[in-house]
Image (cartoon, rainbow, N blue to C red):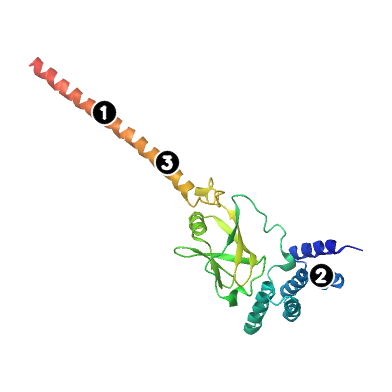
Amino acid sequence: MESLEQLEEQAINAALKHQWDEAILLNKQIISLDQVNFGTYLRLGFAYMQKHELAKAKTFYRKILKMQPVNRIALENLEKIKILEKRKKTILNTTNSNLNPNVFLEIPGKTKTVKLVKLGQKEELAGLIIGQEVQLKQKKRKIEIRTQQNDYIGSLPDDVSQRLKYFIKEKSTYTCFIKETSLTEVVVFIKEETKGRKVQRYLSFAQNPHTVMSDIKQEETSEHEDEEEWIGVGEEVEVVEKDEDLEHIKQDNYDESEEE
């Protein structure tokens, strides 16, 4: 017989792979061995939410509150369920068991995990699901994150927005997925798909967190200075040549006057 620790590890792995039926089965086995395991009740509530079985999810979250009345996760998810039921809004079934396990694979310079700012209404956040693909929408001063139905979720921080706007302007393309979601916090995962020709030598996401556009601006400034220096040399040579021509003309005129 498998130990409690082994069952918990299997239940967590099943959830990470979005294998909700398997996760539910394993967590119920855990409850049969340990009826006061808070984590197991939370996992069951979450798994049932992903399966859109809100009544069953409520049952497990309420059981947690009977044992731990101020459990923040249970309270928040019950609030989320209430919003979904009131608006008859369902959690979008865009990924679940079909989620690519490599969708959140980190690639330095090509991917970035970002916590959104200026979140949208709770009514919209309640329907989000981990792994859901969302869209980047450019505005004048920022980049918004919206659902495929154009519901506003939140915005990228200014530093990330500024850099991505430049790369998108230069024909780079990106995909974006919900990585973490609650009514008070949303984290997205952005991945570079193609890079524009003009920005081929730059990283979409600089490894130095303090770099916004300084690496690009510095190189562009350097190139501009080199161009100005080259032009200056050319102009100086041209002026010298003109001065020499004038000397030749003056010398010719002098020689002619001597002959006379």
Instruction: Please report whichever mark, 2 or 1, sits nearer to the chain's N-terminal start.
Output: 2
Q: Is residue 188 left or right of residue 34?
A: left
Dot 2 falls on a residue whose secondary structure is: helix
Give yes or no for contact between labels 2 and 1 (Cβ–Cβ under 8 Å): no
**Residue under the image location 84 percent in, 61 percent down:** 6
Dot 3 falls on a residue whose secondary structure is: helix
Number of residues whose C-alpha sits closer than 10 Å to that of mark 1, classed few (under 14), some (14–19) or many (20 or more): few
Q: Quadrant of the C terminus?
A: top left
Any mark on residue 240, and which?
Answer: 1
* Residue at the farthest right position: 1
Instruction: Give the camera-side residue of 5 and 199.
Output: 5
Mark 1 to mark 3: distance in Å? 27 Å
Task: Residue 253 in the image: state x and y as whole percent.
Answer: 13, 22
Task: Residue 79 in the image: state x and y as whole percent.
Answer: 65, 78
| Amino acid identity at mark 2 | Asn
Give yes or no for contact between labels 3 and 2 (Cβ–Cβ under 8 Å): no
**Residue under the image location 65 percent in, 53 percent down:** 106
Can you say whether 40 is above or below 237 in the image? below
The answer to whether residue 58 is seen in the rendering is yes
Instruction: Please report whichever mark, 1 or 3, sits nearer to the chain's N-terminal start.
Output: 3
| Amino acid identity at mark 3 | Ser
Label 2: which residue? 27
Dot 1 falls on a residue whose secondary structure is: helix
Instruction: Give the camera-side residue of 147 and 127.
Output: 127
Label 3: which residue? 222
Task: Residue 181 in the image: state x and y as whole percent.
Answer: 64, 68
